Amino acid sequence: MAETKPVPRVGVVLFVLKGNSVLLGRRRSSIGDSTFALPGGHLEFGESFEECGARELKEETGLEMGKADFLTVTNNLFLEETKPAHYVTIFLRAVLADPNQVPQNLEPNKCHGWDWYDWDNLPQPLFWPLEKMVRSGFNPFPSECVL
Ligand code: 8DG
Ligand code: MG
Ligand code: MG
């Protein structure tokens, strides 16, 4: 049987913010195994970015997403992997519907566990698309508008 030609896929991931912290989980995956990454996953047919982000957050952590907004998009090539992949990744910023909710590890086959990490003291190693953003000086927190 002829191999199907690989195509780029769309990932939607969330910077879930709480105080000065973000939610990260250590991946169990053929892509970025053991690295700390944001919650998120594949955009499904017919979904808005916000719907996808809220669904993935719920599936992976049990958390209910509150207000969310678009931050940026990056083009990520994973060509050295056993199964090469190409993701256009949409990054949203979100808060929780209820800030007291506690994350659960609902997909333990895909993640070692979720926790809050201070933005000024992020764990290592970060999943490389995230590492690249952090190194470039990207900051997901709303900038203070001082008039
Ligand atoms: P699904 O079956 O639940 O839809 O997918 P998933 O298993 O949750 O997918 P994922 O790998 O968590 O996310 C899809 C892709 O998004 C991932 O393979 C590469 C891209 N991606 C980034 N940065 C990040 C990130 O920080 N976290 C996550 N989860 N994915 C990211 O480029
Ligand atoms: Mg998922
Ligand atoms: Mg995921």
Image (tube, rainbow, N blue to C red):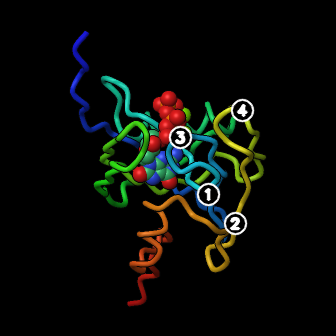
- Quick one: quadrant of the C terminus? bottom left
Q: Residues within 10 Å of mark 4 (few under 14, many from 20)?
A: some
CA separation in Å, label 1 and label 4: 16 Å
Residue occupying the far bottom of the picture = 147
- Name which residue type carries label 3: Ser
Q: Which mark is residue 85?
A: none
Q: Label 2: which residue?
A: 117
CA separation in Å, label 2 and label 4: 19 Å
Q: Label 3: which residue?
A: 30
Q: Residues within 10 Å of mark 3 (few under 14, many from 20)?
A: few
Q: Which mark is residue 36?
A: 1
CA separation in Å, label 3 and label 4: 19 Å
Residue depicted at x 22% and y 14%: 2
The numbered mark, 3 or 1, whose residue comes first in the sequence reads: 3
The numbered mark, 3 or 2, whose residue comes first in the sequence reads: 3
Please determine whether, in this image, residue 118 is positioned above or below residue 63: below
Q: Determine the secondary structure under disc 3.
A: loop
Residue depicted at x 37% and y 50%: 80
Image location (x, y in percent) of residue 101: 75, 46
Q: Which mark is residue 106?
A: 4
The one nearer the camera, 106 or 97, is: 106
Q: Are marks 3 and 4 in contact (CB under 8 Å)?
A: no
Q: Quadrant of residue 108?
A: top right
- Name which residue type carries label 1: Phe
